[in-house]
Amino acid sequence: MDTETLCLCALSFEPATGYDLKQRFEQVYAHFYATGFGSIYPALAKLAREGLLEFTSTPGPGPRPRKHYSITDKGKHTLRERLAAIEPVHRVHSDFLVLMLMADQLTPERVDALIGQRLEAIKYQLSAIKEACSHDDDAPPGAQFVRTLGQTMLNTAAEYLSSHRQTLISALRAEQKHESFSHEPITGESA
Amino acid sequence: MDTETLCLCALSFEPATGYDLKQRFEQVYAHFYATGFGSIYPALAKLAREGLLEFTSTPGPGPRPRKHYSITDKGKHTLRERLAAIEPVHRVHSDFLVLMLMADQLTPERVDALIGQRLEAIKYQLSAIKEACSHDDDAPPGAQFVRTLGQTMLNTAAEYLSSHRQTLISALRAEQKHESFSHEPITGESA
DNA sequence: ACCTGCATGTAATTAGTTACATGATTTT
DNA sequence: AAAATCATGTAACTAATTACATGCAGGT
């Protein structure tokens, strides 16, 4: 899947500007599909050129007009076609977890800070999902399914990180102490 | 992070061939960093050119020799430097969950099949992690941390999918029935 | 005879990220 | 006065995916 199809999906629920989409992606969608401005704007422009989206311009804050995109009938049709052809890959690229894997190559302080940072990000995402729930009641079953799954996964991750944080840090400190001993030259009374 | 650094990480634990790495990535690492041949082989070649890896060739099954890579001291040093500079982004691109989000645009049969497929993939990953645990005991604390987190997350996902599967399918069928009614022309006795 | 597993690699395509550019309004 | 928010877009760069190419060994 690409950002283009994702934008079509999001706009099939309700019209939005590119900026709105970015907000939604980094808030409620972040746990299953993250993407940024640099992908969204070109995608919207291309979809509009192809007639899958249409937009009305209103004066924006900057030099360019603000564009409110909505999906066309052709867009809805194309979306259904594309969805039918997609295979359900599930791909995670977590630099965070690679860093955790390599924890013994990092200082315990950094490991602790990284976990703290990740916990903050999860907290933020959970609150964003919760807020989205409140003013969006008649959500289709799929949206509810994904949202609740997101909450479940994020909560599980947060719980795990909180409860294993201290254990990991302690293990790292113990290992480092051990290593520094074994690297010390033996003060040879034994010789 | 890129596949290059990931290969360096994996090889910092033990030497391996490109093929071995692929196996490990799609088995024990799949839940936090997925990647394929097309990224791994060029990455290994480049790392070897830069002197961060070295390899010994043995005759392989195909026309090309099999290469056993191991990390050099320079590689270890570079790895530590790179790890220190990485910021912990955590990025998920799940076509599966986008499809679930759009479940009402799919047939209930396909939705059910997709969930079944995902459950199979999770089961496979869990068994792979379990097996890796058995013949790799003296793993560093970071590796254990990530492995247990992976098991926790995968189990949670599997439980959620299993327990919400039927509810989602039923909701979809109910909605489709409702829709087909509202699309039917009214057999106007009222007029 | 065919498929799967082992094993490596390249080339073409596709896509995503980062940095830049613009500029008004609101908050600190 | 500076920073953040709103709002859009482009260009350069980096990276990943997909498809292709090779070929033996062992199982069905």
Image: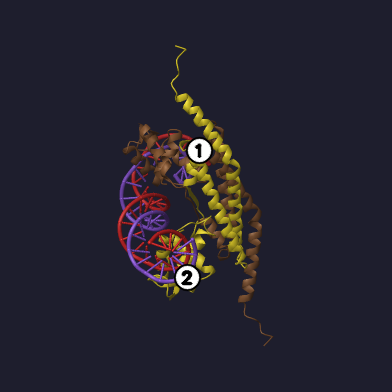
Chain colours: A brown, B yellow, C red, D purple
Up the image or down, A20 lies above or below B4; here it is above
Which amino acid does the dot numbered 1 rest on? Pro
Q: Is residue A4 visible?
A: yes
**Of helix, strand and loop, which one carries label 1?**
helix
> How far across and how far down the image is residue B67, in percent?
44, 72
- Residue situated in front as seen by the camera: C18 or A74: A74
- Residue situated in front as seen by the camera: C8 or A129: C8
Residue at the spot x=66%, y=62% of the render? A170
Q: CA distance from mark 2 to mark 1?
A: 51 Å
Q: Which residue is mark 1?
A: B108
> How far across and how far down the image is residue B121, in percent?
53, 52
Q: Quadrant of residue D18?
A: bottom left
Which amino acid does the dot numbered 2 rest on? Gly
Up the image or down, A58 lies above or below B145; here it is above
Q: Is residue C3 left or right of residue B138?
A: left
Chain to which the residue tagged by mark 2 belongs = B
> How far across and how far down the image is residue B105, in percent?
46, 36
Residue at the spot x=52%, y=68% of the render? B12
Up the image or down, A79 lies above or below B90; here it is above
Q: Residues within 10 Å of mark 2 (few under 14, many from 20)?
A: many
**Of helix, strand and loop, which one carries label 2?**
helix
Chain to which the residue tagged by mark 1 belongs = B
Q: Which residue is mark 2?
A: B75
Seen as rendered, the residue at the extreme top is B191
Seen as rendered, the residue at the extreme bottom is A191
Sequence-first tag of 2 and 1:
2
Q: Quadrant of residue B139?
A: bottom right
Indicate the quadrant containing the C terminus of chain B: top left, top right, bottom left or bottom right. Answer: top left
Up the image or down, B88 lies above or below B78; here it is above
